[in-house]
Image (cartoon, rainbow, N blue to C red):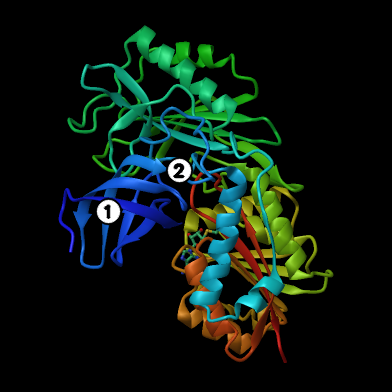
Amino acid sequence: MFSKNDEVDILIEDISNEGEGIGHVNGYALFVKDTLPGDYVHAKIIKVKKSYGFARLMDIIKPSEDRTEAVCENAVRCGGCQLQHYRYDRQLDYKQNKVKNALVRMGGFAADFIDSVMEPVIGMDNPYNYRNKAQFPVGKDKEGNTVIGFYAGRTHSIIDSRYCYIQSEVSNKVVSIIRSWIERYGISPYEETKHSGLIRHILVRNGFKTGEVMVCLVVTSKKVPALDKLVELLGDIDGLVSVCLNINKDKTNKILGDKIINVYGRDYIEDYIGDVKYRISPLSFYQVNPVQTEKLYSTALDFAGLTGNETVWDLYCGIGTISLFLAKSAKSVLGVEIVPQAISDAKVNAQINNIDNALFTCGAAEDVEDFLTENELQHIYGNPDVIVVDPPRKGCDSKLLDTIISHSPERIVYVSCDPATLARDLKILCEDVYEIKRVRACDMFGMSGHVETVCLLSNKA
Ligand code: SAH
């Protein structure tokens, strides 16, 4: 058994969900941040648990062949990227295998079978500058200097960053303008430990297709000095359509408060996924990688095999992105989502696209049956041809899996952000009624260990 501060030499074999390398010494699993499969490293144990522990990388004895130089000088300290030192083509192989292994080990499917249904992972053409939404914390360092950047991994200490490689160019430019405004006009950054100061976060959203840009300052008070000067300076940003304040007075980890005050232009931007337009406000949920989202939804649309006559359920629909993407090719779509604000956004998005065959309702996906019965909608939506699910990491509720099986639609399209719960749910769905036809992973978050998967199941009956 190991103790804290023991030092070991260890061969890294795998990567955890959080992007840490995993290896074994005498059968004991150790998680070592900033290492990769194939690295042989010297590490110091920092935390010991019963069946596994954590160690800090001290020295790379022999690097993995898949290593590359991280582009960002903050890559090791910053909590944002975990895999910058991993060649991008190997990141994609890793994600492909992660999905396959989950389906084999946790889903109980044969490896040969999974190979036969799995298509190549959809990678990014450019795995940098891909995000359309940036949230930079603002604070002070020990010397009292303003710092704007990112939280160091698992902490709230802010690393000052002059350029983030996964954010868009325009977000980086906005930050440098706000930084000079803070310095020139002596605006006070927020200090979390004292719960004092004014500027907490900078939120930037930009529409990749429309070029529209929104800047939202998260502040502790609506009395912001020299705000007119900021708006003037932000005039340098092409496509700026909105500047607003978000008031967050609370002592909380939550980034955004509920109140928005519009300072310049409108209080939303618009963007497209495919030819569907979406209205995005500071508080709305919207996919952060629009280029890959379009590929993901196109895959889901392809898997759904719609001809125009189908009744479709889109469960866990968020702001209705998938529902609206599918509506034009279906007879009718029912979107179900638990967050009320998301459902009102979905309704607005249906309206601005003149889509009138999508109905959105706020509630739990697992209660969809009750909703149809109570509202006497069984005759319209009661016999879905296709059910799409896109649940959070915890996967589908077991009651929902029963509901799906009892309705036995022709096809199920399962969009998943966690291969483990995907495998667990597919095992249940494929026990009797369904079989996996197609599986495709898609990389939405380059430089992180996360992977999104779309899966087509077909009814065997
Ligand atoms: N399909 C959407 C959002 C998927 S994220 C998109 O592509 O943008 C998963 C969504 O499930 C979140 O919006 C979350 O609020 C919602 N959710 C979580 N639990 C739910 C439940 N039990 N029933 C319905 N929706 C739920």
The residue at 58%/68% (across/down) is 100
Crowding at dot 1, Cα within 10 Å, few <14 / some 14-19 / many 20+, comes out as many
Marks 1 and 2, how far apart in space?
20 Å
On the rendered structure, is 120 left or right of 106? right
Q: For mark 1, what is the residue?
A: 54
Q: Position of residue 28 (x, y in %)?
A: 28, 64
* Element assignment for label 1: strand
User: Between residues 391 and 151, which one lies in front from this camera angle?
Assistant: 151
Q: Position of residue 151 (x, y in %)?
A: 34, 36
Q: Position of residue 397 (x, y in %)?
A: 46, 76
Q: Position of residue 379 (x, y in %)?
A: 69, 83
Three-letter amino acid code at the position of disc 2? Pro
Residue 15 visible in the snapshot: no
Three-letter amino acid code at the position of disc 1? Phe
Labelled disc at residue 63: 2
The answer to whether residue 204 is above or below residue 224 is: below
Dot 1 or dot 2, earlier in sequence: 1
User: Between residues 83 and 42, which one lies in front from this camera angle?
Assistant: 42
Residue 321 visible in the snapshot: yes
* Element assignment for label 2: loop
Name the quadrant of the C terminus. Answer: bottom right
User: Between residues 392 and 369, which one lies in front from this camera angle?
Assistant: 392
The residue at 27%/53% (across/down) is 54
On the rendered structure, is 229 left or right of 257? right
